[in-house]
Image: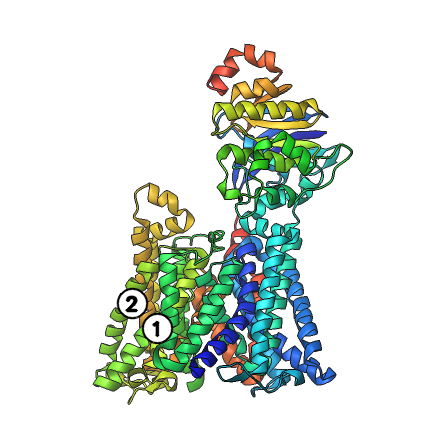
Amino acid sequence: MLDLDHVDAFYGDSHILHGVSFTVRDGEVVCLLGRNGAGKTTTILTVMGYLHPRAGAVRYNGRDIGALSPYAVARLGFGFVPQERGIFPSLTVRENLTVFARGGRGDDWTLERIFVLFPGLKARERNLGFQLSGGEQQMLSIARALMLNPSLLLLDEPSEGLAPMIVQEIVQILHRLKGEGLAILLVEQNLRVALALADRHHVMNKGEICFTGNSAELESNDFVLRNYLSV
Amino acid sequence: MELLVAQLLNGLVYGVLLFLMAAGLSLIFGLMNVVSLAHGSFFMLGAFLGLAIVQVTGSFWIALVLAPLAVALLGIVMEVLFLRPLYARGHMDQVLLTFGFTFVFYDLVQTVWGRIVLRLPTPAILQGTVDIGAGVFSAYRLFLIGFGFAIAVLLWLLLERSRIGAMVRAGVDNAAMAAGLGGNIALLFTGIFGFGVALAGLGGVAAGPTLGLYPGMDTDILIPAFIVIVIGGMGSLRGAFVGSLLIGIADTFGKAYLQSIALFLIYLAMTVVLLIRPQGLFGIRYADAPPSAVARTMPPSTKATRAVGLIVLAVLIVLPFGLPDYPRALIAEIYIFAIFAMSLDLILGFSGLMSLGHAAFFGLGAYAVAVLGVQFGLDAWIGLAAGVALAAAGAALIGFFCVRTGGIPFLMLTLAFSQLVFSVALKWRDVTGGSDGMALAEQPSFFGFSLSHSLVMYFMTLMFFVAAYLGLRRLIDAPLGHVFVGIRENEPRMAAIGYPTLAYKLVAFTIAGAIAGLAGGLYVIYNGFISSDAVYWTASGDILIMTMLGGAGTLIGPPIGAAVFLLMKNVASSYSEHWLAIIGTAFICCVLFFPGGIWGSVQKLRGKAAP
């Protein structure tokens, strides 16, 4: 469904992404791994339309979406969970969930279903966004993306800065979403989270993809683990 | 007691009118991070369109509904066609553009309705007075208070209780995130701009029967509305409400009981709030300024550019001999304002700080010459030296507070401080002559030559201009200038490698103030007269326009901008009554077609031509 084809992207004059290509198929969880500054977030921002590729193409179901703005990309069916979580501080938890919610096809996410999956958010329904803990913010950010009823979920380091217990909880939730057939593009630095969830891994270094493979292949590749992931 | 209640009610009336202005302005600031100086114009247009509708239909109520809608339509057209292309370019261009529109709208109103003060008829049902227990009060004014509070409640419900309101708040919080969730930010911006403009238009109609209609009512409401937003906090409806009532009541009581210092008190209050709570009483945060759209760093001078410089200088020396008196005097004035504009460029272009209060230092220099000359009989040149020192001291003091901020807060603080200086100049009549101004008794001589001769005046100002240009050029090419540019480009990095950036910004601000003081002093020597108008915020606006028009950050641009501005003003005003509209249109075209100013565009063309 999502297809990156030799994408080059720039911040101003600095060349960040060099010919990045990969594919996310229906119902698949694909993980981008790599150290800080490897270009993972830049890749996600390019997919979302915050950056536009200067060469190559980003395709969604065969259509070139490289020139679209974030608003148009999101409306195609992308659920975006950014690294900094992007909770609206002056909206309540409930408003954060409903403000941009959209109906999808068939088995819709509704407030009721969200509160079943995230009982912690139900308890905080009337709190304002800035009153949440880091873990709650992460849950809310994921839940808010689900309320858009996306076909593809984009997660930028959902485990970053969170306690192991909460990371575990988030992994379980993502597992359930995967089980329901939702396609996910996951950016991670936490190898264990990546191995627990992804069907395929792409390891990035200096704006290029330097390894592609499934979990077993990644685990057995000492060179990649040592040089690009500092494990 | 009765008087007190009446004053309180009058304060509330003014407060709700301010609120209608400030609510829209605040949302536009907070959500769109746009500085719209044209908001007062929409207030004025609302009032005048209301008048036209009343004249046709005979009904105040139809006007109250239709005029805001018409104004909103105009606002939407302006946002879509003119503002939208500028969002990526930063505040400077938005200020220049909306300033241009204020000129155009002012001229339009003046042309259609003339300059006399008109009045909207009070609707028949609200004529007369009501006994409120503590005396009688105008029925219409009572209605206004209720109307204003009702609008405030409706706005609050809309913003806090509706999904559209939640979208607006989400956009204020984090517009990029809202877009990433499928929020149509472009549509939201247009909607909010139109809505805010409609509120301003509504305020204009509502104010019509009490404040009166005249060209200039735009500025008279815009500045207090700015102050309200600064005090209340940008993007905060509650802040706009509380701030409006505070300023409305304070202003009314001040004018009644503390006439001479009322204005001063309000600006002082604004300054104090900004210093203690820079985000305002209810503001959550300041929208951060996108990097200023300034031209790139100047190329260092080469043999070729030096040769061109010498040729230009030679032309300027020969030029006056072929000219009659009037153009000589005009060019002398251009030199003075070129010095003023270059001084602003030091903080605007080379330090990336946008000041809307630079006229304060011009004024300090000017008043030093005038006051020392008139009150103490001191020689103008001694006054000039004192003026430079006074302007430098004033800039150091004001800069001490201002340089801690950046972006819109810096703009607001410099505006507030300069209005403080203005209110002193206006109210301290015994010394400054207030709005009547003061005149030098005799024109000073320059090394024995009488400055009443236009040729002497020409060469005196040319000398100072060349000296100021070379001095600034030297400063910018020196290591100190590189530090200024470094701070403009990336302040955290400069701080991280050990430069005390605040101190450097203060140095830039002080030097700029001193040179502005020099220009002010020269202006009094040139003009023989100074009044409080020279320190009014529009004077700061004019010099900002000259600098940006020519090209900020280029040093050559500001003199070009000063020349173009003053030539346009003089030529256009002598050939057409509509010179304001002509100048305003020129600004608008300049923003749209010459980003980076005239000289900035020339540089870009040259950059493209060169391999």
Q: Position of residue A226 (x, y in %)?
A: 47, 15
Residue depicted at x 27% and y 82%: B371
Is residue B582 something that shows in the picture? Answer: no
**Quarter of the image where the N terminus of chain B is located:** bottom left
Say which quarter of the image contains residue B197.
bottom right
Res B436 label: none
Check the image and name the residue furthest to the bottom: B441
User: How far from the left and from the top, in percent, is residue B78?
Assistant: 64, 65
- What chain does mark 1 sit on? B
Q: Secondary structure at mark 1?
A: helix
Q: Which residue is mark 2?
A: B394
Q: Vertically, is B189 above or below B70?
A: above
Query: Nearest the camera: A16 or B303?
Result: A16
Image marks 2 and 1: residues in contact by CB distance under 8 Å: yes
Label 2 marks a residue whose chain is: B
Disc 1 residue type? Val
Q: In this image, B381 relative to B477: left or right?
A: left
| Quarter holding residue A59 | top right
Residue B223 in picture, x, y percent from top left: 47, 71
Q: Is residue B177 above or below residue B375?
A: above
Outermost residue on the top side: it is A220
Determine which residue is flagged by label 1: B421
Please name the amino acid that badge 2 sits on: Gly
Residue B392 vs A59, above or below: the answer is below
Residue placed at 49% from the left, 58% from the top?
A: B234
**N-term-proximal mark, 2 vs 1:** 2
SS assignment at label 2: helix
